[in-house]
Image: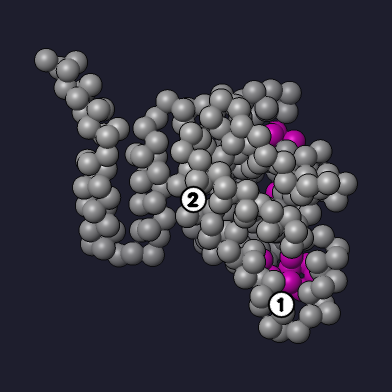
Amino acid sequence: MSEILYEVQDKIAYVTLNRPEKRNALNEALINSLKQVLQQIDKDSSLNAIVIRGAGTDFCSGADLSSLRKISESDILQNLSDAEKLMDLFLLLRRLKLPVIAAVTGRALAGGCGLATACDIVLAAKSASFGYPEVKIGFVPAMVTAILRRNISEKKAFELITQGFIFSAEHAEKIGLVNHVFDDETFEENVKEYVSVYNKLPKSAVSLSKKLLYQIDTLDFTSALQIGAGINTIARFTDECKAGIDKFLSKKD
């Protein structure tokens, strides 16, 4: 059975974590397959957005038991190599040209919550739950913290990673970790309606906006403005921008 399912609906790529019997727990095969599929999608100029979801009842429950056992039995260099595989996935999600939307149902825990957090947008069913419980087994959601800290306030991030409690989709939305919460009964249709917006927007502008947002993460104000000026200039030379300006001006004449 393939760890990842992939289909296209109305120019949107739907990528499904496909280990429902393991609550879509992360292992090396799933992470590698997900990276390969995302890289493949990024080369397809006909697509406008990516949705990542989980098969069965849960989005992703974190690392599976075999992966945890491997951690405890491996030496420091083997563990570093293993951690870097997940790091590469998080980096890839930010470097993809297309917006990536996590559609979370059921549980998104530990690395699974990190995967959702690493996406550009998070949509959640009302019954979904989130959490970074690593601290409870003496572990640290170390790479995820780099992303979490960029999503929510320092004090909220501290609370989540040092107490490890599970929290609701509505709480996740309240603290800024989730963009929107939809009713369970209409969740699938709500997600499709939400992501369809990207079919109506200039693809180059969306891609450049994503690139700009993440480029200025750690820059001072002046440097961020300078990067913005460069992106602004590039946008002006895209066919979509030229066509958009012409259309706008024609309405004013």
Horizontally, residue 71 falls left or right of residue 36, namely: right
**Residue 185 falls in which quadrant of the image?**
top right
Q: Residues within 10 Å of mark 1 (few under 14, many from 20)?
A: some
The verdict on residue 177 being magenta is no
Q: Image quadrant for the C terminus?
A: top left
The residue that label 1 is drawn on is: 79
- In the rendered structure, which segment of residues is drawn in magenta? 123-141
x and y, in percent, of residue 36 in the image: 62, 53
Which label's residue is closer to the chain start, 1 or 2? 1
Q: Determine the secondary structure under disc 1.
A: helix
**Residue 195 falls in which quadrant of the image?**
top right
Horizontally, residue 109 falls left or right of residue 21, namely: left
Q: Where is 145 relative to 25, above or below?
A: below
Front residue of 75 and 167: 75
Q: Where is 192 relative to 18, above or below?
A: above
Horizontally, residue 246 falls left or right of residue 38, namely: left
**Residue located at (73% from left, 55% from top):** 30
Identity of the amino acid at label 1?
Asn
Identity of the amino acid at label 2?
Leu
The residue that label 2 is drawn on is: 96
Q: Which numbered marker is on residue 135?
A: none
Horizontally, residue 204 falls left or right of residue 68, namely: left
x and y, in percent, of residue 86 in the image: 64, 64
- Mark nearest the camera among 1 and 2 is 2
Q: Determine the secondary structure under disc 2.
A: loop
Front residue of 190 and 230: 230
> Would you say residue 166 is visible in this rendering?
no
x and y, in percent, of residue 176 in the image: 54, 46
